[in-house]
Amino acid sequence: MSTAAPPEVSAAAAGQASIADIARARWEAFKGGDVGSVPVIVGIIAITLFFTAKTTIFFTAVNFSNLIGQMAGVTVIAVGIVFVLLIGEIDLSVGYVSGIGSVMVAEFQKSGSSHDYPGLVAIGLAIAVCAAIGAAQGSIIAFLGVPSFVVTLAGLLIAQGMIIYLLGTEGVIGIQDNQILDVANYVLTKNTGWIVAIVFTVVLAAGSLGTYFSRRRAGLPTGNLLLTIGRVVFYGGLTFAVVAICNHSRGVPLVGLVVVFVVVLFSYLAGRTTFGRHVYAVGGNAEAARRAGINVKLIRILCFTISGACAGLGGVILASRLNSVDLTFGGGTLLLDAISAAVIGGVSLFGGRGRVSGALFGGLIIGMISNGTDLVGSADWIKYVTTGTILLAAVTLDTVARRRQVAAGR
Amino acid sequence: MSATPAPPPILELREVVKNFGQVHALRGVEFEVRAGEVMALVGDNGAGKSTLIKCVAGIYSIDGGEILFEGKPVSISGPKDAAKLGIEVVYQDLALCDNLDVVQNMYLGREDHDALYRLREAPMEQKTAETLASLSVTTIRSVRQPVATLSGGQRQSVAVARAVMWNNRVVFLDEPTAALGVAQTRQVLDLVKRLGEQGLAVVLVSHNLTDVFEVADRITVLRLGQDVGVYEKSATSEQEIVQAITFGKQDAEASA
């Protein structure tokens, strides 16, 4: 499709692209299999409309606030999964590793024990333990070449066993530390919420316009200025809308901020740093990456370490939310929800394609279905069947998109 | 070319031997390439072309003989040594990441970054566009296109451009036209000629003698792990090269 490019458009063509050009390029890419965020946005709108029609509670400020709390843990875990999927591997251990994170944070803060640490220290230690588990699994995969599917399956079982061992005969640890409880339960004051929205919008505007003008200064082709401003206004407006809705009930939950922070941090890591570039390269063509001098083994280990650390933070959030840790932690649908969130968010199971922000959108969809079916009072089977169907659709879309991209390329 | 005193070869192999157990892949091969020339390396399957490339690229270590760079003996014991000397190989599979765009592929593993490992996209994009323009690669619409969306000739061009962007002095091209159609072969052959004109030493490995005769200045023929000889393009014919490839020099002379 690109061989027919008009000769006057050279590789160095500078200047501002027109909106029509951008729209045409997006449409070409869409036809070529790069569907972008279209299915996710359509999905979110459809689910919202469906549950709003079914129950009056769904589309309310209180429920929105609840939804943020419900999706937070899974979304953070899914962010870690994104890195593992990007290098074309899988991590099945994240569910129970997050359970380890929950148990660890509860254990480290336990009053009366020898390690009665302050909340933030306990959180840091719990995340570090999970990161170490991820690093260990990653090392086995990278150095010994054992398939990640098997290594993390073993990790899943070992982590599950460790949770049972650590919780011992009591089977439950209560959380009294206020810092830990605040992670999932603290609500920002309304004014703080507004300040956060302002800061977020200003940073977003500075980043977008900064990129635009630095590219223009360098004489490189830029996007459309109007579209850039439009995007900032849209996302800024969305932020203010979210804060407004939350403030309509109790306020913005701190955990929502944590999720956004994690997503932004890891998006930056994936999109703007050499590490992120190398992650995509390993996922796209590991042999090419190796020949280009990239330390493929190190990248693999680091991705599994990130996966473990995110699972740990997710576990802390889940533990904080329920005020205590018991034997059910890390089990249930947590693992599959986290992987589904990443895949539904457009991260390819074949490696090399997808964005960290996909975890947020995927987590939102998974959270909305779970939240909505609970509100409607549907039987559990409906929740599972719906989530399963959406996951199947997402993977099918990914596979078809990949095939079309290859076909469009040659 | 033969009239003027020939410049010394930038890369020279003397009596290079490479064995894989009982298999003698290279049995005392002589090979040289000068800056500014396109040297073709031809031979039948199993003649030792790939082995020779991998020895020079540092993937295999040689078992005998010596490699000279600018007249000085060098030891190439890994791809890094080869890269340091300015020897780059573009393999047949191109080693591109389909999911990354042209700029990202050109800078793969050598990204321009600041102290915090943040990527400096603007200079990378500028340099990529300049490099492609200097090689007259004009068919690529945007350097921000994923490589997956490029045609075979464009992909080859990107791989070659990447090899020359890093001030490399000797570039090996392994079967660059094997998978290409007529128009795209044209593109790549023009590119190969331009590399020679820009003062690089280019080694073109190819089965296609038409392509070889179009762009090469000299032709080295390998047969059964030995060099049959070096032929000036102006003083030989396709038929002579085919004879040399299939029967070696003596037989070719005997049958002539």
Image (cartoon, rainbow, N blue to C red):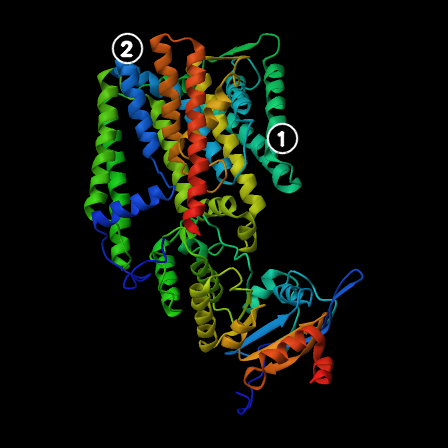
- The quarter of the image holding the C terminus of chain B is bottom right
Amino acid marked by disc 1:
Val
Instruction: Read off the residue under disc 1.
Output: A150
Relative to B83, is A53 on the left or the right? Answer: left
Between B80 and A5, the one lying in front of the other is A5
Looking at the image, is A177 positioned above or below residue B145?
Answer: above
Please identify the quarter of the rendering in which residue A216 is found: bottom left
The picture quadrant where one finds residue A153 is top right
The earlier-in-sequence mark between 2 and 1 is 2
Q: Tell me if I can see residue B13 in this picture.
A: no
Q: Position of residue B93 (x, y in %)?
A: 54, 56
Q: Is residue A139 left or right of residue A204?
A: right
Q: Amino acid at mark 2?
A: Thr
The chain holding disc 2 is A
Q: Tell me what residue is drawn at x 52 percent, y 72 percent.
A: B211
Neighbours of disc 2 within 10 Å: few (<14), some (14-19), many (20+)? few
**Discs 2 and 1 lie in a common subunit:** yes
Query: In this view of the protein, which residue sits in the foreground, B43 or B202?
Result: B43
* Residue in the picture at 49% in, 44% down: A279
Residue beneath label 2, please? A55
Tag 1 secondary structure: helix
Of marks 2 and 1, the one in the foreground: 2
